[in-house]
Image: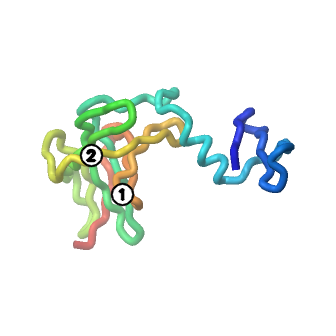
Amino acid sequence: MPITEVSLDMMVVHSPVSMSAPRLMSSTPPIMLMTRMCRRRKLTADAAQPKRSATMISLWGVQQSTVDFYQVIRISPKTVVVRRVDARIVEIVGPMDAIVEAVPDAFRDEEQRRRPRIESGEWVVDVESWERATRWDGTPAHTVRYA
C-alpha cells in the first residue's frame, strides 16, 4: 500500500480496492504507518549524538535489575560501534544489591555494530532484542543479581 506523507496527522493512502482514487485519512494512522514514518526520520534531530568514548547504560531484567555499561568506539552516519565495559561496585546495599558505575576502557566483550535510533528525543542503541542502551549521565546505578 503506497503511502504519501502529508503531515503527522493527515496522510493520503491509496486504497487497495481502487488504486485510482486516493482517500484521505484524517484520524491517527495505524501503528505500522507510524513505524514506517519514524524509520525515515534522520538521526540528526535535536537529540544529542553520543560522542566517541561516551558511556551508555543498559538497565534490563525481570526478576533482577541488571545494569550493563557500553562505551562508544566509533560512530558513522548509520551505525554505532559499542563495547561492553566493566562495572565497579561503589556501595554494597544488601546481599544481592549493589550500586555500580562504569569503568572506562575496561572492555569485557568484542565490538558490536548497531543501528541507533531516536526515542523520545534521545539516542537509543538496541544491544539485544531485550536490551537497549542510552546515554549514561555518570550517576551510579542500582543493580540486583542472584548469581
| Residue in view at x 14 percent, y 40 percent | 105
| Residue in view at x 74 percent, y 48 percent | 29
Residue 88 at x, y percent in the picture: 18, 50
Instruction: Give the vertical position of 42 relative to 97 (above or below).
Output: above
Q: Considering depth in this image, is 9 or 69 the residue closer to the camera?
A: 9
Q: Quadrant of the C terminus?
A: bottom left
The quadrant in which residue 38 appears is: top right
Q: Farthest front residue?
A: 20
| Residue in view at x 37 percent, y 39 percent | 135
Q: Amino acid at mark 1?
A: Glu
Q: Is residue 126 left or right of residue 106?
A: right
> What mark, if any, has residue 128 been given in the picture?
1
Q: CA distance from mark 2 to mark 1?
A: 13 Å
Which colouring convention does the figure follow? rainbow
Q: Using a 10 Å C-alpha cutoff, classify the residue at mark 2 as few (fewer than 14 neighbours), some (14 to 19) or many (20 or more).
A: many
The quadrant in which residue 77 appears is: top left
Element under disc 1? loop
Q: Using a 10 Å C-alpha cutoff, classify the residue at mark 1 as few (fewer than 14 neighbours), some (14 to 19) or many (20 or more).
A: few
Residue 93 at x, y percent in the picture: 27, 60
Q: Amino acid at mark 2?
A: Tyr
> What mark, if any, has residue 70 been given in the picture?
2
